[in-house]
Amino acid sequence: MSLRFRLICLFAIVLVVSLAVESTIVFFNASRSVRTEMNSALKVGQQIVGSALARLPDSNDRRRDLEDLVTSFKGNRHLRVSLTGGGAADPSLERSLFGTAPPWVVRILGADPVAARIPIAIAGQDYGSIVIETDPKNEILEVWNDLGDNLIVLSLFFGLNILLIYFFIGRALRPLNCLAVALKQIGHGNYKLRMDGNPVPELSRLQRSFNRMASELEEMDEEKRRLNEQLLTLQEEERSEIARDLHDEISPFLFAVNVDLAAISRLAGQGRCGEISGQIRATSEAISHMQRQIKTMLGRLRPGVLAD
């Protein structure tokens, strides 16, 4: 998993947790707000109904006034009022023009309708009861719409932040890709390579360290080449010296040994055996001299090691 993807995942987790916490707080406050709003609406409705009922004994048409009272609540977003018993009037229903909130939102907010029943009896005559019931659907729908708008804004904010993180983190970490390529070139022996540019401060020290390492490797490579050249020069000089010693010290004695052996062969053929011993001594001395010369050359080639 790349570092960029890890950072994006970390940021996504933080945003999701923040969104969950914020949603919890929003739903908690919304639930309390809906209940408060419904209780306030119920109290206001009770006051309106109470005031109307206080004027009802003076009315000439009490039944019609009660129906008008129920009708006056039509269009109310938070209350449903109905007249029950004694020729009940149609309840004041108000349908939302903007749909309804999902059932799970209603369950989470927990704002159940609350009803209040007010009996009506004037001069011993029963006119039924007025039922005032809270209707939290519109208030919940308003909360849901606000929450939906907030979710859209947060989603856009989340997407924008992901894009910005992807772009800027990629831009900031681009020197790491360059460093990987540069290290590969260093591995192939290109010690003259240097990293340039102005990376972020966290990577600037890494860039300087790489350039310093490349410089030191280049110096070491140059030193190695110089030592190799010196070694080759010394080897060539040693070979030249050995060749000179072989030519100057060994070759004449080899020639002398060859001459002595030819003389020994000739003397043996002539039956002059008494003279052969002198030639043998001369040959032995020449061979001894060559052995000493070869031992000396071996000593120069392998100091401290003398062959028996």
Image: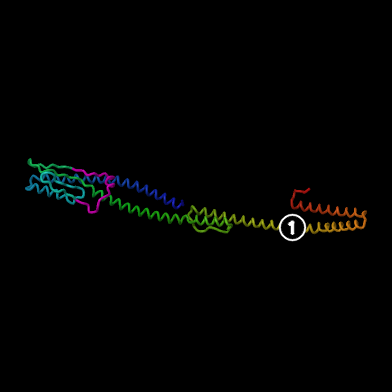
Q: Is residue 167 above or below residue 58?
A: below
Q: Give the crowd class for mark 1: few <14, some 14-19, many >=20 residues within 10 Å.
A: few
Q: Position of residue 184 (x, y in %)?
A: 55, 56
Q: Secondary structure at mark 1?
A: helix
Rendering colour mode: rainbow
Q: Closest to the observer: 177 or 56?
A: 177
Which three-letter amino acid code belongs to the residue tagged 1?
Answer: Arg
With 114 as the anchor, is 89 left or right in this view? left
Q: Is residue 282 above or below residue 86?
A: below
Residue at 88% over, 57% down: 265
Residue at 88% over, 53% down: 280
With 132 as the anchor, is 241 left or right in this view? right
With 232 as the anchor, is 143 left or right in this view? left
The part of the chain drawn in magenta is: 94-115
Q: Position of residue 139 (x, y in %)?
A: 24, 49
Q: Is residue 277 magenta?
A: no
Residue at 74% over, 57% down: 239
Q: Main secondary structure of the magenta part?
A: loop
The residue singled out by tag 1 in the image is 239
User: In which quadrant of the rendered view does residue 255 lie?
Assistant: bottom right
Q: Position of residue 293 (x, y in %)?
A: 80, 53
> Number of labelled discs?
1
Q: Position of residue 29 (x, y in %)?
A: 29, 45
With 25 as the anchor, is 66 left or right in this view? left
Q: Closest to the observer: 256 or 137?
A: 256
Residue at 9% over, 47% down: 63
